[in-house]
């Protein structure tokens, strides 16, 4: 570890910081992951100071060289982090000063750790959002491939987890493609508010040096600067907004995970999942437990908790910066880590899903899934819908007593429930007939599922 050195603010105090306080308040154990972004921000700040005449060309060259050495050491795992130096910023600044002398001490001119950390975390989060968008799109591609392979695979659609109407497995999977599409849109929109530069706000009131904030923003790829210095250093809306978007992503993945758990249960038997995503039992040799989907559900609660933690963290903070804000990082870091790992593993897991069409078709037959089609048939023959609903309900009760599906009833049997029923009724009582009748945008007809997959691929290619 590096040797301890006086704090950046130590001249004001007459006794050293208590060791317990030092450990309690230090953040370097987790904020060191911001190191590369801290160096990016510092180099842009130094270039700006040189541009406005506050920092000499000699000092800029020394800072640039020193930061290059520090960056190499960090990437190689050779940088020694010290808890005595509190955080990532002071660790880097101390090492820079050791390497290049007084030029390192001049780097902090015109800024504070308040606007420095706010800049670093925005740079880091912008980078992570870009990665997460690509991971979400990769999962969408996997799901589109699965949907395309099952455009005509009949399965029951459910409401209240009861068999409702026939759909196709491809149509079902496309619902998750839509969810992820909204997730990507939210990440992209959130990125706009992340991508604003706080640097230049200094501690809270700005600085008396003739800085050029727009220049720094351009150097770092920010869209614009934060326009109020108090808000710039104390705002964590962007972190809360991102975590809210992350919680929605995890909620969508958790819904998919829950369905995977149900579908691989022998009572459903709709899919088989790769052994590498399951575990056995220490006592029951027959078990194949869906541990990965279950953990997706569990980790969703973790991310939801981070969102509540950040909201609670900020709810009573007066302007401007407060030490409370140090607690923003661990929930934010863990949200990104959880999202990244979950998107990756779900994408890989879905590539290995084996669909069981026969089991899905058997399930369609068990729940009178074409009852609504029979009601629609009668309405098209002129019967009011409520009367049609009642007639079909009686037909379903009769079929249930006979242990038959509706399409297995004879024309004579069906005719007892309405004289409007003719031989053409059997064309609507099959799962295929039901699917084909939903031939509109967003419907489950195979023709529409095929079109939806094409639309999604075109949209993602833009």
Image (cartoon, helix red, strand yellow):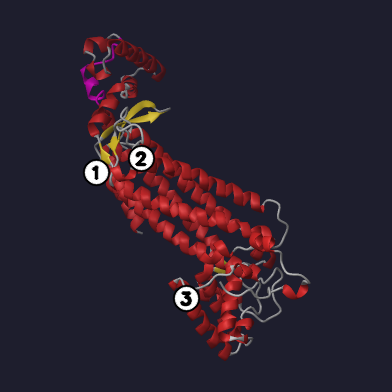
Which residue is rendered at x = 65% and y = 80% of the image?
Answer: 109
Local SS, label 3: helix
Give the mark nearest the N terminus, 3 or 2. Answer: 3
250 above or below 169? below
Crowd around label 3: few <14 · some 14–19 · many ≥20 (10 Å): few
Which residue is rendered at x = 25% and y = 30% of the image?
Answer: 359
Q: Are marks 1 and 2 in contact (CB under 8 Å)?
A: no
Q: Disc 2 designates what residue? A: 442
Given residues 99 and 448, the one toward you in this image is 99
Q: Disc 1 designates what residue? A: 149
Give the CA distance from mark 3 to mark 2.
54 Å
Within the image, what quadrant is residue 202 found in? Answer: bottom right
Given residues 276 and 380, the one toward you in this image is 276
Given residues 302 and 424, the one toward you in this image is 302
Indicate which label's residue lies in the foreground, 1 or 3: 3
Q: Are marks 3 and 2 in contact (CB under 8 Å)?
A: no
Local SS, label 1: loop
Give percent across and percent down for residue 242.
53, 54
Crowd around label 2: few <14 · some 14–19 · many ≥20 (10 Å): some
Taking the image as shown, residue 438 lies to the left or right of residue 230, namely: left
The answer to whether residue 290 is visible is yes
Give the CA distance from mark 1 to mark 2.
18 Å
Give percent across and percent down for residue 408.
23, 17
Q: Is residue 424 magenta?
A: yes
- Magenta residues? 417-430
């Amino acid at each position: 570890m590096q040797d301890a050195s006086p704090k950046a603010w130590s001249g004001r105090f007459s006794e050293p910081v208590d060791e317990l306080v030092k450990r309690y308040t230090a953040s370097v154990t987790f904020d060191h992951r911001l190191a590369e972004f801290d160096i990016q921000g510092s180099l842009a700040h130094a270039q700006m100071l040189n541009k406005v005449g506050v920092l000499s060309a000699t000092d800029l060259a020394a800072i640039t060289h020193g930061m290059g050495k520090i960056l190499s050491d960090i990437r190689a795992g050779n940088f020694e982090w010290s808890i005595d130096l509190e955080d990532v910023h002071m660790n880097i600044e101390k090492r820079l000063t050791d390497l290049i002398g007084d030029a390192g001490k001049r780097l902090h001119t015109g800024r504070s750790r308040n606007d420095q950390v706010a800049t670093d975390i925005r740079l880091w989060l912008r980078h992570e959002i870009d990665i997460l968008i690509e991971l979400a799109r990769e999962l969408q591609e996997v799901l589109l491939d699965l949907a395309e392979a099952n455009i005509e695979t009949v399965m029951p659609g459910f409401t209240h987890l009861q068999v409702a109407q026939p759909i196709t497995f491809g149509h079902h999977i496309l619902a998750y493609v839509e969810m992820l599409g909204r997730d990507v849109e939210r990440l992209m929109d959130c990125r706009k508010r992340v991508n604003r530069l706080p640097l230049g706000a200094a501690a809270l009131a700005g600085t008396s040096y003739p800085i050029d904030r727009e220049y720094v923003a351009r150097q770092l790829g920010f869209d614009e600067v934060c326009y109020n210095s108090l808000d710039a250093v104390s705002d964590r809306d962007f972190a809360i907004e991102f975590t809210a978007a992350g919680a929605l992503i995890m909620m969508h993945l958790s819904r998919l995970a829950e369905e995977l758990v149900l579908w691989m249960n022998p009572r459903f038997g709709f899919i088989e999942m790769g052994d590498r995503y399951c575990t056995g039992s220490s006592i029951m040799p027959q078990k194949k437990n869906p541990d990965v989907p279950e953990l997706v559900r569990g980790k969703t609660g973790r991310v939801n908790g981070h969102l509540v933690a950040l909201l609670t963290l900020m709810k009573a903070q007066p302007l401007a910066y407060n030490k409370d804000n140090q607690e923003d990082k661990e929930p934010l870091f863990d949200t990104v880590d959880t999202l990244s790992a979950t998107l990756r593993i779900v994408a890989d897991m879905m590539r290995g899903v084996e669909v069981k069409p026969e089991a899905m078709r058997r399930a369609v037959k068990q729940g009178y899934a074409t009852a609504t089609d029979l009601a629609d048939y009668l309405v098209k023959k002129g019967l009011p819908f409520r009367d049609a609903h009642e007639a079909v309900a009686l037909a379903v009760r009769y079929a249930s007593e006979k242990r038959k599906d509706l399409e297995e009833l004879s024309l004579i049997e069906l005719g007892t429930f309405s004289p409007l029923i003719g031989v053409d009724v059997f064309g609507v009582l099959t799962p295929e007939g039901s699917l084909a009748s939903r031939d509109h945008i967003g419907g489950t007809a195979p023709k529409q599922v095929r079109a939806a997959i094409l639309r999604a691929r075109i949209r993602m290619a833009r």
